[in-house]
Amino acid sequence: MGCNFGLGILLFASLAGAQTDTVGVPDYTVEHPECPLFGPRYTQYVAKALNGIGTTPHQAEVSALTSAVAGLLPKVPPGSRTYTYQQSQSGSIDSYIFGALQDAGVAPAPQTTDVEFLRRVTLDLTGRIPTPERLAAFLADTSADKRSRLVDELIERPEWVDKWTMFFGDLYQNNSQNSQIRRYPEGVKAFNDFIRASLTGNKPYDQMTREMIAATGANSYTQGELNLIVGGIVTGGPIQDDFDQQTANIATMFLGMSHVNCLLCHNGRGHLDALSLWGSQTTRYEAWQLASYLSHTQPKNVPVNSAVNNQPYYWNVQDNTAAAKTDYPLNTTTGNRPARQPAGAEKNVAPEYIFSGDKPKAGESYRAALARALTADPQFARATVNYLWAYFFGVGLVDPPDQFDPARLDPDNPPPAPWSLQASNPRLLNTLTLQFISNKYDLKWLMRTIVNSQAYQMSSRYNGTYNTAWDSLSARHFVRRLWSEEIHDAIAQSSNILPSYAVAANGTLTWAMQFPEPLNTPTAGNGVTPFLNAFLRGNRDDEVRSDDGSISQALDLMNDNFVMSRIKSTGPATSLLVKNLNLPNDQLATNLFLAVLSRPPSAAELSAAVSQLSTGTRAQSAENLLWALYNKVDFIFNY
């Protein structure tokens, strides 16, 4: 296609620079051969923890990305309302954030404009970009509470359920096949449906968690919550491998403590000394006590058609309550972990909760007891708060978010030197944790509280010279690249050319944010799959979702058929370009900016666009303009 764009529009070199290696963070390799199950999924996090206390590689990367992208964004559009900071209520997020900034003598970034806030919060809460109509209404609204009312509106949308079903599907690693077992698409759909129904009904998060951990049932295709336990099954070894992996998964997902996986192989001393103060003082036996809560669990695969070989199977998850059933046995010399042998005369380990010493009550199912003890543990609420904080702010109050060290969280009882408190703002983390508990583990309350804060509503731009040492103070907002599904859905929505995808066990879907998993979705062979994979959506197993950039992402935005088919002036009559093609040049350009970038063009951008539309073949020039907007840096970043 023609490439005679105005330089004020294209900014293509800026896009490429922001997506390639601008950060300069070194690669890390961590050898941990004694923990074969620790795996590549955690290697990057161990490396970050080894970096020491302070700014981790992740924080440095996010900070550099924020600086790169914020510097390339257009100036604030004219007429866009800017907020000033208000007095913070004691005990609020803002009182802690702005108090820490004041104590450090650091000025906060200015507040976002209305245009920036609308796009940021709409993407963060729903995974969609705002429509031009919603933008116009928001800018026309002069009421003081319009931002909080917008948040309430977004949280009640079906798209909110789509986005957070995807988020928790990632957290719970809901996929049809991992390196050990298969759930099959029907199991993935059932688990996805359980998450979706829980969010739709605003089920308290502690209840949702208990239902997954304690679930028993006959068919994982019809009872979705069974699939959490199924995901921890390990093949080819003794049953203790299952107990250990299920325990490690639960500790990571619900307590933010992936070091439990290490402790299920060996004592912490000598292995976790540089990573976790708590872990260095914790024994393998204590981890076995936690794993013993799973020792009565007996998942079993059941062929869909027992008369035919190699059929798909579903899972039956039951507890063995027979009197002869023993607790966690110490009797292995094989499997995926080091030998488990008797401790003196003790050949079985009884369950005991690793923090409180809680034990199952008489007649209580072991997993029900675990679910009860875990959701009553403040660390459960603390980890949930931190996982969501890390999503909305780009870095956790404890970061990486699955590397909690319980011995370094209490500001009134700090750890001994050379250790320091782990959380960047420990009193904020503890206060928000207690508030989440007092609000009955309401995820909507937690998200509403975070995004309504002035801290969340800071600009990614910074007045004056910014120091990366201020990252932990939340002195400005970190930029994030959109998820793969968000980029797909933004292109489909803005172009008004909606796709239709066959998805195994799910029928036909339009929006990528509704896909039940990344693996083989849409069905194999669909041409959009390479485009989605280029933006690193992961596989919910050994490839985590990543917001890293790459040359292939830039090339796909320039050339992939998913983009190119949506910029044609010969497209459907209802498409964005065809509907606007006969409008005056200034109105055509403005409408394309509003639909794609969720903002009006700056004066310089509008002048360049009108000039371009006035030369050559108008239809071709209009296609070039739309193509350029999809390739602008502020299309694929949320700032």
Image: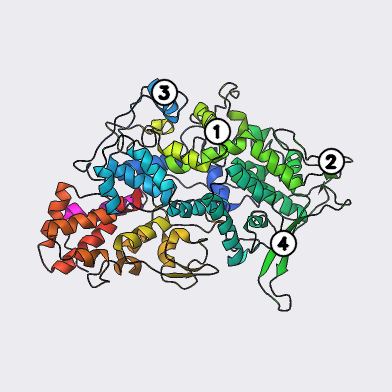
Please give the residue where the numbered disc 3 appears in the rendered image.
99
Specify which label sits upstream in the sequence, 4 or 3.
Answer: 3
- Tell me the mark number nearer the camera, choosing from 4 and 1: 4
**Local SS, label 3:** helix
Residue indicated by mark 4 = 218
Q: Which tag, 4 or 2, sits closer to the chain's start?
A: 4
Q: Are marks 4 and 2 in contact (CB under 8 Å)?
A: no
If you read the primary sequence from the N terminus, does the residue marked by circle 4 or circle 1 appear first?
Answer: 4
Q: Which residue is mark 2?
A: 343
Amino acid carrying mark 4 in the image? Ala
Residue 63: x %, y % from top left:
38, 39
The local secondary structure at tag 4 comes to loop
- For the residues labelled 4 and 1, the Cα–Cα distance comes to 36 Å
What residue range appears in magenta?
Answer: 1-22
Looking at the image, which is closer to me, 605 or 369? 369
Give the amino acid type for the residue marked by disc 1 in the picture: Thr
How far apart are the two marked residues, 2 and 3, measured between alpha carbons? 51 Å
Of tags 1 and 3, the one toward the viewer is 1
Q: Residues within 10 Å of mark 4 (few under 14, many from 20)?
A: some
Query: Can residue 632 be spotted in the picture?
Result: no
N-terminal-most mark, 1 or 2: 2
Q: Quadrant of the N terminus?
A: bottom left
Give the camera-side residue of 287 and 563: 563
Which residue corresponds to mark 1? 433
Q: What residue is rendered at 35% in x and 67% in y?
A: 562
| Residue 174 shown left or right of residue 623 in the figure | right
Marks 2 and 3 close (CB-CB < 8 Å): no
